[in-house]
Image: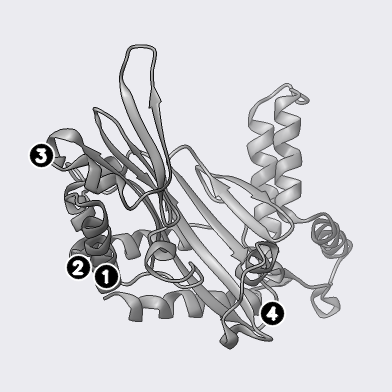
C-alpha cells in the first residue's frame, strides 16, 4: 500500500561509495557549484529526483512508480523490499539505511458510484482543514494530509494508459500522506528505509491509515419525513435540515468559521454553540439516516485488512 517515499541518506551512512557509479544511472544529470564552493549533483532515477551533496543523498518520488510501470497500484511489503534492493543496486548505495522523510500509504477501491458522490458524506475532522476540489477531497494539517480522489480522472488528466480492469469502473483512492516529523508520528527514534518492510511497522502504518479514516465525521443523509412531523417545531426542524442539505453541512460549518473571523458575535462561545447545534440537528435519528454510500465505503476500507501483509 506504499506509494511515494522520500528518503535521505546521510553521507556518514553512505560509506565510501564510488560517485561515478552512482551518477551513471541518473538521467538529466547536472552539476552545480554553490557560492561557498560546494558542488552538488542533481538528476533523475526513473521518476525519483536525486540530489547528491557533501551532506548526503536526497531521493524524492513514488516508489510504486519506480518499481511498477505506474502508480495505479501500490506496493506490498515484499514489493517494497524488492524496490529498495533495485534502487540500492542502481545507485550503488546502502539505500536501506536511509532515513524516511515522507510516506504515502494508499489503496484503490472499486465503488458503486463515482468517487465525487461520496465526498459530501465525509465531513469535518478535528485538527484538519477540509477542502474540496472538483475531483478530490483533502484534509490537511502541518504533519499529515489525507486525500480521497478519483484515480481514473487523475490518470486521464495525465494522459496515462489505464488498466483494462478499470474500464467502466469507478475507482476511489484513499491516501494517507505522512509528510513531516515521521519518527514523532510513529513514536520511534528513527524510521529508515528497511523499516518499511518490517511487519510490525507496516501493520502500524495500516492501523494509522484506518484510524485516520474513522476519525472523519460521517455526514448523514437528510430525509423530509412527514410521518415524524407532529408539531410546528418538527416542521421547522425539517425545513432547517433541508436548508442545510441544500447548502451542505461542511459549507455551513465553514460559514460559521467565517463569522468567527469577522467577530460577528460578542461572545466567542456562540460559534461553537452554532456548530454543535448544526451537528446535533444533522444527527437527529428521526430525520436523518446513515448514507448507503458511507456504509459501502466503510465496508470496503475495513476489508482492506487483507493487505496487512
Q: Which mark is residue 168?
A: none
Q: Secondary structure at mark 1?
A: helix
Q: Marks 4 and 1: in contact by CB < 8 Å?
A: no
The crowd level at tag 2 (other Cα within 10 Å; few <14, some 14-19, many 20+) is: few
Q: How far from the left and from the top, in percent, is residue 137? A: 63, 56
Q: Are marks 2 and 4 in contact (CB under 8 Å)?
A: no
Query: Can you tell which mark lies on residue 113?
Result: 4
Distance between the alpha carbons at the discs numbered 1 and 3: 29 Å
In the rendering, which numbered label is found on residue 77? 1
Q: Confirm or deny contact between disc 2 and disc 1 (CB under 8 A).
A: yes
* Local SS, label 2: helix
Left or right: where 186 falls relative to 61: left
Task: Look at the numbered discs 3 and 2 and tell me whether their residues touch, using CB distance below 8 Å.
Answer: no
C-alpha gap between disc 2 and disc 4: 34 Å
Give the camera-side residue of 147 and 276: 147
Q: How is the image coloured?
A: one colour
Real-space Cα distance between discs 2 and 1? 8 Å
Residue 25: give x, y in percent of width and height.
33, 53
Residue identified by numbered label 2: 199
Does label 2 or label 1 sit earlier along the sequence?
Answer: 1
Q: CA distance from mark 1 to mark 4?
A: 30 Å
Q: Quadrant of the C terminus?
A: bottom left
Q: Quadrant of the N terminus?
A: bottom left
Q: Are marks 3 and 4 in contact (CB under 8 Å)?
A: no
Question: Mark 4 or mark 2, which is nearer the start of the sequence?
Answer: 4
* Disc marking residue 16: 3
Q: What is the CA distance from the residue labelled 3 to the residue labelled 2?
A: 31 Å
Mark 3 surroundings: few (<14), some (14-19) or many (≥20) residues within 10 A: few
Within the image, what quadrant is residue 121 found in?
A: bottom right
Earlier-in-chain disc, 3 versus 4 = 3
Amino acid at each position: 500500500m506504499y506509494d511515494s517515499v522520500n528518503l535521505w541518506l546521510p553521507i556518514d551512512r553512505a560509506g565510501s561509495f564510488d560517485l561515478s557509479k552512482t551518477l551513471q544511472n541518473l538521467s538529466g544529470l547536472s552539476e552545480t557549484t554553490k557560492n561557498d564552493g560546494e558542488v552538488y549533483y542533481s538528476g533523475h532515477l526513473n521518476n525519483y529526483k536525486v540530489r547528491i551533496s557533501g551532506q548526503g543523498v536526497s531521493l524524492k518520488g513514488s516508489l510504486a512508480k519506480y518499481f511498477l510501470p505506474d502508480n495505479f497500484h501500490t506496493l506490498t511489503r515484499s514489493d517494497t523490499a524488492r524496490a529498495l534492493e533495485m534502487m540500492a543496486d542502481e545507485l550503488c548505495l546502502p539505500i536501506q539505511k536511509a532515513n524516511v522523510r515522507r510516506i504515502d500509504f494508499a489503496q484503490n477501491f472499486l465503488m458503486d458510484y463515482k468517487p465525487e458522490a461520496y465526498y459530501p458524506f465525509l465531513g469535518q475532522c478535528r485538527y484538519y482543514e477540509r477542502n474540496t476540489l472538483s475531483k478530490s477531497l483533502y484534509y490537511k494539517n502541518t504533519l499529515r494530509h489525507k486525500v480521497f480522489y478519483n484515480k481514473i480522472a487523475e490518470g486521464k488528466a495525465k494522459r496515462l494508459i489505464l488498466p483494462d480492469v478499470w474500464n467502466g469502473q469507478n475507482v476511489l483512492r484513499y491516501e494517507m500522506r505522512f509528510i513531516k516529523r515521521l519518527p514523532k508520528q510513529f513514536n520511534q527514534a528513527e524510521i529508515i528505509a528497511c523499516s518499511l518492510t518490517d511487519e510490525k511497522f507496516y501493520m502500524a502504518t495500516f492501523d494509522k491509515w484506518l484510524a485516520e479514516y474513522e476519525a472523519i465525521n460521517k455526514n448523514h443523509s437528510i430525509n423530509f419525513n412527514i410521518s415524524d412531523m407532529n408539531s410546528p417545531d418538527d416542521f421547522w426542524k425539517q425545513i432547517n435540515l433541508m436548508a442545510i442539505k441544500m447548502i451542505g453541512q461542511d459549507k455551513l460549518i465553514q460559514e460559521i468559521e467565517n463569522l468567527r473571523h469577522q467577530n460577528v458575535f460578542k461572545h466567542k462561545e456562540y460559534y461553537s454553540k452554532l456548530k454543535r447545534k448544526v451537528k446535533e440537528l444533522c444527527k437527529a435519528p428521526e430525520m436523518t439516516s446513515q448514507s448507503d454510500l458511507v456504509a459501502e465505503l466503510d465496508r470496503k476500507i475495513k476489508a482492506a485488512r487483507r493487505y496487512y501483509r
